[in-house]
Amino acid sequence: MVHPLLFLQFISSKLSEALHIGEASANAIVYTWLVIVLLLIISKLATGNMQSVPRGTQNFMEVVVDGIENMIVDTMGEHGRPFFPLVATLAIFILVSNLIGLVPGFFPPTANINTTAACAIIVFLSTHIVGIKHHGFHYLKHFLGPIWWLAPIMFFIEVIGHLSRPVSLTLRLFGNMNGHELVLMIFFGLAPFLVPLPMMLMGVLVSFIQAFVFMLLAMIYIQGSLEEAH
C-alpha cells in the first residue's frame, strides 16, 4: 500500500514537471485540492443522513456553522446573512489549510503566497462588487470624502487604502503560516521528538487566530461597502 505522503509528493513532482512550476507552487496546488477533498468528505458525512437530533459529524458541523453565522450577525447585522456562504467558506478553508500543515510532512497551502493572494483577491473583488450592486454609481462617493474640494486628493488616498487591503490580507496570512512552517521544519530537523511539540501546540492557536482575523477583516470590508458614504 502506497503511503499517502509519498503519493502526494509523487503527484506534486509530476505536477511541477508538467506545468514547469516550482516545487512550492506544486505543493500548494496539491494540498489545496487535498483540503477541498477533505471538506467535501466532511460535508457529505454531515449532510448525508440529516437527523432532527444531530449526532456525530452533523452535530459538530452545526456548531461550526452556527458559530460563524452568529459572528457574522454580531459584526454585520442581519443584512450580513447573505454573505454567510462566502465568509464561512473562506474561514473554514483557511482554517483547515492552516491545520493540515501541523501533520508531519504535510504542507499548508496558506504557507504559499499564491493561495493567500487568491483568497485576498476574492475578498477585494467581492467587497467592491457588493458596494456597486448595493449603491450603484453612488458607491464612488466612498472614495471622494466629505468635502467636495478635497475630493481629488481623497480619491487617491482612498484608492491606495483599498488597494493595500488585499496586500495586507495576503502578507499577514502568508507570513504567519510560512514562518511557523519554517520554524517547525528547523525543530524537526534538530530534534524530531519532543522539542517540536510546543511549537505544534502553538501552531493550532496560530491557525485559529489567522483564520479568525481573515474572516473578521472580510466582514468589516464588506460591511464598509454596504454603508452609506459620509
Image: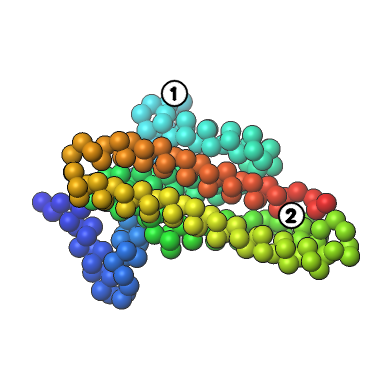
The reply, left or right, for residue 212 in relation to residue 228 is: left
The residue lying toward the viewer, choosing from 77 and 59, is 77
The reply, left or right, for residue 213 in relation to residue 204 is: right
The image quadrant of residue 49 is top left
The residue lying toward the viewer, choosing from 92 and 141, is 141
Q: Residue 134 carries which label?
A: 2
Q: Which residue is drawn at 32% across and 53% down?
A: 182
Three-letter amino acid code of the residue under disc 2 = His
Does the rendering let one see residue 38? no
Q: Residue 53 carries which label?
A: 1
The residue lying toward the viewer, choosing from 100 and 83, is 100
Q: Residue 81 carries which label?
A: none
Q: Which residue lies furthest to the top in this view?
A: 53
Query: What's the CA distance linking mark 1 and mark 2?
Result: 39 Å
Q: Which residue is drawn at 68% across and 38% down?
A: 77
> Vertical placement of 32 versus 88: above or below?
below
The reply, left or right, for residue 138 in relation to residue 31 is: right
Q: Residue at x 32, y 64 (%)?
A: 24
The residue lying toward the viewer, choosing from 206 and 49, is 206
